[in-house]
Amino acid sequence: MRPAPRSPAHSGGLASLIEECADKLALVISYHSGARLVLYPWSWSSEEPPDAHLLRELGGTYAWVAGYRLMQSSRLYFSFGELMDYVYGRYGVPALTVEVYGWALDQGWRREHEARIGNMTVFKHAFECFNPSPGGELLEVLRANAVALRAMLLRYASVLVVRVAGGPVPEPWGLPHWRWRREA
Ligand SMILES: [Zn+2]
């Protein structure tokens, strides 16, 4: 079953832009903040996506280089109307969500920054939770992501381009064959 767009971000301008250029898109990455993760579809279901292997190869390379963890988005929590699910589900364009920074999954940080007021949990320093401090820390996050994106594209560019051109797709897990190997 294909998921339908559910959030307002996917209606109107963005949806028509995607519709217009979907056949030229080789890869879509939706950048978020709040944790240090690379997520692959689906967000709305715990079922494996049809291209799970390819998506894990792409996301795994990015995650390994950036120092993030890779997981299926729905394992973090279920969410609906994600851009990633939409472009992959509707158009078959490989898509990932990258959470570039944050303390949302850090129990220690949360203990120090959550306060109970009556029956309500108040989150202190929300800006700090989602944003690296300007300057060195921000540059480090940007650098790590630029390097990870470049590494992933260098490794999988041919797979992604052939895929979007409609040609026979070389299986990414065939890549080790391209490496130099000593023959016995
Ligand atoms: Zn997010």
Image: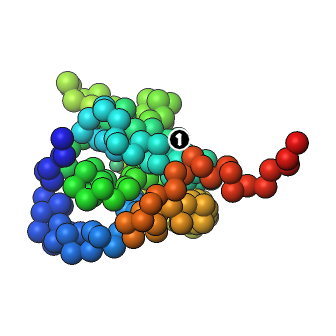
What secondary structure is marked by label 1? strand
* Residue 82 seen in the current view: no
Image point 80% across, 50% down: which residue?
Answer: 181
Q: Residues within 10 Å of mark 1 (few under 14, many from 20)?
A: some
**Which residue lies most toward the top here?**
119
Q: Is residue 160 left or right of residue 124?
A: right
Residue at horizontal 50%, vertical 30%? 108
Residue 125, image x, y percentages = 39, 47
Residue 149 shown left or right of residue 124 in the figure: right
User: Which residue has dot 1 on it?
Assistant: 69
Q: Residue at x 37, y 66 (%)?
A: 166
At a point 37% along the width and 62% down the height, the residue shown is 28
- The quarter of the picture where residue 42 lies is top left
Position above or below: 82 against 72: below
Quadrant into which the N terminus falls? top left
* Residue 52, x across and y down, in percent: 42, 42
Give the image location of residue 94, x and y in percent: 38, 56
Amino acid type of the residue tagged 1 in the rendering: Arg
